[in-house]
Amino acid sequence: MPTVLSKLRVIEEKTGKKFGQSLLVSVRSGAPLSMPGMMDTILNLGLNDEVVQYLQSSTNNERFAFDAYRRFIQMYGKIVERIDGNKFEKLIEEKKASRGVKSDVELTASDLKELVHEFKQLFKAESGKEFPADPNKQLRHAIEAVLASWNGKRAVEYRRFYKIDDKMGTAVNVVAMVFGNTGENSGSGVGFTRNPSTGERKLFAEFLINAQGEDVVSGARTPFSIEEIEEKMPDLFEQLSRIGGLLERHYRDMQDFEFTVENGKLWMLQTRTGKRTAQAAVKIALDFVSDRMISDEEAVMRVEPAQLDQLLHKHIDPEAHMDVLVRGIAASPGAAIGKAVFDTNRAAELGKLGESVILVRRETAPEDIHGMILSQGVLTQRGGKTCHAAVVARGMGKPAVVGAETLVILDNHAQAGDVVINDGDILTIDGGTGDVILGPAPLVDAEISDDLDRFLTLADKFRKTGVWANADTPAMVAKAIEFKAEGFGLVRTERMFNAKIRLPFVQRMIISSTTEDRKKWLEKLKEFQKKDFIDIFFAAKGRPVVIRLLDLPQHEFLHAPASSELGELIAKKLPSLKEDNPMLGHRGIRLGMTYPEIYEMQAQAIAEAKVAVEAKGIEVRAEIMLPLTSEAKELSTLRDLIKRILPDSPVGTMIETPRAAVTAGEIARYSDFFSFGTNDLTQMTFGMSRDDAEGKFLVKYVEDKILPNNPFEVVDKKGVGRLMKIASEDGRLENPRLEVGVCGETGGDPESIEFFINEVGVNYTSCSPYRVPIARLASAQATIKRRSAEDTKAKYTTV
Amino acid sequence: MPTVLSKLRVIEEKTGKKFGQSLLVSVRSGAPLSMPGMMDTILNLGLNDEVVQYLQSSTNNERFAFDAYRRFIQMYGKIVERIDGNKFEKLIEEKKASRGVKSDVELTASDLKELVHEFKQLFKAESGKEFPADPNKQLRHAIEAVLASWNGKRAVEYRRFYKIDDKMGTAVNVVAMVFGNTGENSGSGVGFTRNPSTGERKLFAEFLINAQGEDVVSGARTPFSIEEIEEKMPDLFEQLSRIGGLLERHYRDMQDFEFTVENGKLWMLQTRTGKRTAQAAVKIALDFVSDRMISDEEAVMRVEPAQLDQLLHKHIDPEAHMDVLVRGIAASPGAAIGKAVFDTNRAAELGKLGESVILVRRETAPEDIHGMILSQGVLTQRGGKTCHAAVVARGMGKPAVVGAETLVILDNHAQAGDVVINDGDILTIDGGTGDVILGPAPLVDAEISDDLDRFLTLADKFRKTGVWANADTPAMVAKAIEFKAEGFGLVRTERMFNAKIRLPFVQRMIISSTTEDRKKWLEKLKEFQKKDFIDIFFAAKGRPVVIRLLDLPQHEFLHAPASSELGELIAKKLPSLKEDNPMLGHRGIRLGMTYPEIYEMQAQAIAEAKVAVEAKGIEVRAEIMLPLTSEAKELSTLRDLIKRILPDSPVGTMIETPRAAVTAGEIARYSDFFSFGTNDLTQMTFGMSRDDAEGKFLVKYVEDKILPNNPFEVVDKKGVGRLMKIASEDGRLENPRLEVGVCGETGGDPESIEFFINEVGVNYTSCSPYRVPIARLASAQATIKRRSAEDTKAKYTTV
């Protein structure tokens, strides 16, 4: 921009002050800060053939000037003109190859000058226009492109994953540049005020000499670790530590910052609340409480309940002594088993089909985000703990191993020494240890850490609703108790029929032509089930156990007959049991109405088990739950039958048909409790079979925002939720002592839990044992949120 | 009862007055009168060995005395002690055979004396006790038995069929006897003040000489017809006519009465409002209006809408010239085709399984009622127009041919000359002509009579809501217009895909792998569909036509490929389309969301057809209806697409998923109309597939009164109905111009129609063409009922 530059020179001459490199600016998205790496940034803006000369002369550093220039053309071309970044990278690789060097920093000023020339040619060939020399134009286009990146694919996908409102929008910051690429006395780095993996109260940073910020994030070169910084650059370490402390006290949270050292001087570029693993989040929250920087309540609100899932992930069994193929950097905890897939799009496709996939990439970039979302885990050859793959995987709670340098990752396979990993080969990765194993490795369950235990105990102080677990076996009951489940909201009895040794009895029972005959086989089944119930009652140690009587349709039990005679009898019976839409068929309480002797047997088995366990001094609190009720008279009929056998046990029903919800007032007359089965209720409310929908149109519905979420994962508040509110209100109006719970899958989802507690008014939620800690935290947060909403309301309504 | 009798003799001697036969009483149920023949009656009560002597001496009629005695033992034995009536009948048959006579009346006094003896032995053998001689005991047990008959199987079944409240209960009348069996100068009869089949304004009665009432009803002997009475007993005829007129003026309705002539003197035993065919009901109502005996409104309320179904039944095509096997008495109009079944229980069983059955019996008795309910029609060898079979069949609106005397009906087959009818042979009966044909005969549709037309026009005066029809073809549209349908609430488009010649195009379209390819095949289908729509628009003559776009899942169209190449392609595609629960699968608007080009094609075909028909000067009012919506965004997306092609056509949706009902407020923003699809809405609300339920547990649910009705036939008010009310209220609140209709099967059911109009507040109901007259009447009645309920309310709230 000759005219501006001429004017500047005049000013420089008049004032004796040099503008030099401060003539250049960076253009970056200013908000929201919670979307790291998702928005475009353009550095070194303002360069053209004339300005680069001025830059060179004013800094007396030709290499720096052309390094900045080539970076600018590449970034501008990629972001403003959407030119494939790999094409620029390819030119760099060729240049390095022709010079016989391995790293960008080894390229000379004249190499870079040539690259600038080649980049401009590439720019013209790809965009059909000359690279713009006018800095005003550069700036305007850059601002537009950065704003536009808000609607770019990766930003949209990121927001969808983290449920960030699309309408929030972004600002653009235009700031004078400082340069980390002026030579060996400069560099760029990123840091965290505490360890983002462990939460350890210790500065954590990485620093790359003679580099700009994107070099650090991309993971192309391995940076100095915090230990190396402390050892080799004690001044920098001291400054970062001091500033980190200042930032933390100011923002009252752990910070993630970027910095640049320009010719020995430290510049802080940006700070924001740092992403962290669940483990770190828990530890940091506890430490901040200890330091009296935040209240107990704030600490509880600081950890995303869904994130705890990470801590409850399995890891590779250390006793298994598997052969470790390579060991990379343990970047995001948890173990994952899946097919190695080298292409992001393919990983996304397979993931959508429900396959377990490990995305294997040299390094990941924001373009890979959709593949990461749909993979079980991520493995990269390059990068450190702050590289893109590591940051994103931690944010998503997915296992990741990064910087597995001994693995050479190519387009469609990878090589580790002699071993070749082909597309589709099964890998196990453990993001807690960095281990990568060929084939599936045995995994073991997580145990709750002391920190997590302390943190959840803190959360429990605020919780007003019960957290129960769905558990079908004594082992699940025990696991749930370890996680402090307070009851068992769904004990299914199907497995008590399905065990191989019992199946022939079940089958004989089903094909019985008379009630007498059926009762004979049921009598045998009762003995089995009695044992099952005894085990469960012992394991539950006096906590309430909600037993759901048989739900499945009979034909589900008619597979694999034990003898050919039985097979023939079954074949004869089968056609009369076949159903076009088995989900809407002869199952649940309808079976109980047709064959009351089945429920009678189950009630009898429970009664006998109760006596046996109580005889050993263990309290038994069995509650009997009937599935699929759609009419109060069903319940009144079978309640009487069960009460005759178990006079002291509460008898209730699942609310899982829409009719049960809208006739809940009447149903409540015969129910001691309701338990929402959100799975079936969602299926019937939408008229949508989960199995038939999820693989097909439902994914597209969520992608196209026809629905905000998969309603089988997050409760559909408008439809299913409204029915739940109707049911709960009408039920309680008719029977004020009615206990209301949720035992569907959404009972373990934090967003749903908040709705259930604050809108439906449940007494407890019940979920799978491994989600009990999540539910404890989510329930506490829901109660805190409601109270704070009520406080706000009170404030504005009291004059 | 010797002591009482001795006292009576003393009184007789003192007063010179003879008690004679007036010593005996009848014990019968006093209420409700609307259950003819369903309750037990015991005649001639008070007889014992001593009283019979007194009766004989005081009447000087030994035959009469023992005839009364044997009748009493039989009735008492049957009703009080539940002894099988056939065992008594068998003794009578044996007696007749040994005497070589055909009729009871030919048995002599000594035959009857012997029978009394044999009956008493039978009584003792069966009940284990002596026949009670004490009239007080007889009376007490008889009263208890009559009261108990309220809960007898046939009474319960009758009430279920006619929806009479079980709690209504009964009284018992004990009345002095008059005797029709004292000789040739006595007899019993039943009559109607007008013809109960045609409504003709002419006395209608039957009279049996020397008989008691049950002889007439059983149809065992053929009575004098009204013509014979007029000719041979002009005095009786004149008296009956005069009393009939008196009764009608008093009760303001046609009467059904019983009478007995005792030694030449007429006694009226009972009168009640008479059961009548629909044809008679219509004619009688119109005649009462002409005579100013009732108001228009009362006339409209006098005919049961469901009864009109009879008039709209098919009859045997007179052009077909079928061989008539036998001709009986045309006892209840309409034709039926079905398997001949000779056993009532078997008929009921097969009927439950959905088979068409003609119940063939020598005569029917109250015990046959469950078989009649589940048969398509009834054929008897004996009886006249007032016999049990005739009365019950008319009440139920089922075709019946009775008194087909040339047919000899045996236990499991029947003989007509040389022809044998075996169990399971197909019969056609026409209850309008009395014809019985072996094999299936071609049937033709009913046409609306002048009387019915006048009556419905009267009803239309009171109607405030539209009556529309569901019609898929121009012929159905024309038929519905004949019945005065005002619009077409459901025009399905599936047949426009399913026709044989089109199927290959549809199949190619479904297996297309690209949108372009799919559009190519759709373009061809468009031409077919355009023609279909042209035909329908012409037939509809400017009435609104609500076209439902494709609803069925794709796999429904993949049967019967036209070529093996196409077959292979289909076989490849099929697995990906298979669904576990197709009702809850990828169908309806979900198809439209995935393949908008299908709906686009249909809209385009409609648009082009509209232009073509309007060019001929015929108005076209096409409305576009989308099926299976569960989320407002589905509708907003596809509404835009359709509005671009058909800017002036209303676009609306079916409300058939529970979610659509509870989110109707939002959906109404994008809907010009709602149409309730009660079939799917019922299935999803209950979580009950109609096909899987009706053949299985649903019948039992209705029988056991778990549900008051089959909810697919009569809308479930508590559940489905509540959702409908929510949808209609929320929808109108959001969009006050919203039109609300019903197009599900219940749209043709009177009870449901009343609910839809008075509780849901629909603008119109839509039903199959043949139910349009029923819907017109039901709608008028609903409006009258609401107004009268409001009047009552106003009366009690205005002081």
Image (spheres, coloured by chain):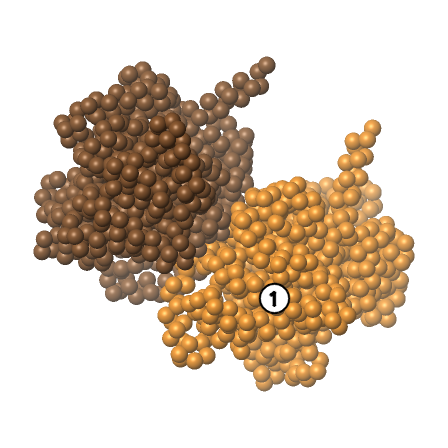
Chain colours: A brown, B orange
| Front residue (pair B110, B439) | B439
Residue A779, horizontal then vertical, whole percent? 39, 29
Residue at image location 44% in from the left, 30% down from the top: A757
Residue at image location 29% in from the left, 50% down from the top: A116
The answer, for residue B458, to whether it is visible in the render is yes
* Image-based side of A439 in relation to A363, left or right: left
Quadrant for residue A127, please give it: bottom left
Q: To which residue does mark 1 refer?
A: B604
Residue at image location 69% in from the left, 78% down from the top: B317
Residue A89, horizontal then vertical, whole percent? 27, 52
| Front residue (pair A307, A681) | A307
| Front residue (pair B100, B252) | B252
Q: Which image quarter holds the C terminus of chain A?
A: top right
Q: Chain of mark 1?
A: B
* Image-based side of B294 in relation to B138, left or right: right
The residue carrying pointer 1 sits among few (fewer than 14), some (14 to 19) or many (20 or more) residues within 10 Å by Cα, namely many
Q: Which image quarter holds the N terminus of chain A?
A: top left
Residue at image location 28% in from the left, 40% down from the top: A56
Residue B228, horizontal then vertical, whole percent? 82, 71
Circle 1: residue type: Gln
